Image: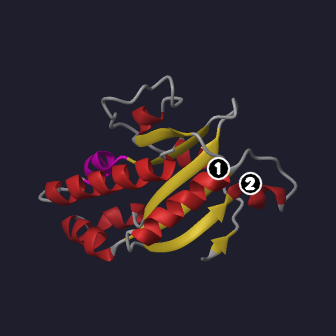
């Protein structure tokens, strides 16, 4: 597994998104992330364990793990503090390519990314871009079936990673 250390901040990733609310998401519980196109689930595990469990699910399902980025370590490398924050980048060209065939611009959001972070209260979260948000953002037409497939896969993958 490849570990990449970058000093990117969580704020830059989360605040640049807009629209697309997951109907059953509680905007107050997740800090309003659903309002910005991010599906976020609480994890009962630490950031590191949640990330490891997610990576195990990715590998079990035959997906490609491209990178695991530890932002906290990156911040420490430049003498800055950041709560535990990891980004896992993964995908499957059989699913991503059809989206790019609908609109090549969606490639800016691919491969898929999952963000695992600890909030100011100590709660750990596992989040990812809502596939419907990607559909709206990139005006994907004719890709509804692929979006549904991705939505189901991401939901199953992340739910399994945080299951007791």
Q: For the residues marked 1 and 2, what is the alpha-carbon distance in whole angstroms?
A: 11 Å
Q: Which numbered circle lies on residue 47?
A: 1
Crowd tier of the residue under label 2, counting other residues whose Cα lies within 10 Å: few below 14, some 14–19, many 20 or above: many
Q: What residue is at 24 percent from the left and 65 percent from the top?
A: 99
Residue 105 at x, y percent in the picture: 32, 64
**Between discs 1 and 2, the one toward the N terminus:** 1
Which portion, as a residue range, is magenta? 130-138
Q: Nearer the viewer, residue 125 or 32?
A: 125
* Secondary structure beneath label 2: helix
Residue furthest out toward the right: 79
Residue furthest out toward the front: 164
* Figure quadrant of residue 58: bottom left
Q: Which numbered circle lies on residue 72?
A: 2
Q: Nearer the viewer, residue 23 or 106?
A: 23
Color scheme of the displayed model? secondary structure
* Secondary structure beneath label 1: helix
Residue 161 at x, y percent in the picture: 48, 53
Query: Marks 1 and 2: CB-CB under 8 Å?
Result: yes
Residue 80 at x, y percent in the picture: 83, 51
Judge from the rendering whether residue 147 lies leftward or rightward of residue 55; answer left or right: left
> Relative to 7, is 39 above or below?
above
Q: Is the magenta region chiefly helix, strand or loop?
A: helix
Residue 135 visible, this angle = yes
The verdict on residue 24 being magenta is no
Residue 9 visible, this angle = no
> Relative to 118, is 24 above or below?
above
Q: Nearer the viewer, residue 141 or 131?
A: 131
Q: How many marks?
A: 2
Q: What residue is at 38 percent from the left and 30 percent from the top?
A: 25
Quadrant location, the N terminus: bottom right
Q: Nearer the viewer, mark 1 or mark 2?
A: 1
């Amino acid at each position: 597994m490849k570990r990449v250390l970058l000093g990117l901040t969580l704020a830059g990733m989360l605040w640049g998104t807009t629209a697309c609310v997951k109907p059953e998401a509680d905007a107050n519980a997740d800090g309003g992330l659903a309002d910005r196109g991010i599906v976020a689930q609480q994890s009962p595990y630490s950031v590191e364990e949640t990330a490891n469990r997610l990576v195990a699910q990715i590998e079990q399902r035959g997906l490609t793990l491209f990178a695991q980025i530890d932002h906290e370590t990156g911040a420490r490398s430049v003498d800055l503090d950041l709560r535990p924050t990891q980004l896992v980048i993964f995908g499957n060209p059989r699913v991503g390519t059809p989206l790019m065939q609908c609109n090549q611009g969606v490639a800016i959001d691919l491969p898929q990314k999952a963000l695992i972070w600890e909030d100011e209260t100590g709660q750990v979260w596992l989040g990812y871009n809502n596939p419907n948000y990607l559909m709206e953002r990139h005006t994907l037409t004719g890709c509804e079936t692929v979006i549904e497939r991705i939505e189901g896969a991401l939901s199953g993958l992340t739910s399994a990673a945080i299951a007791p």
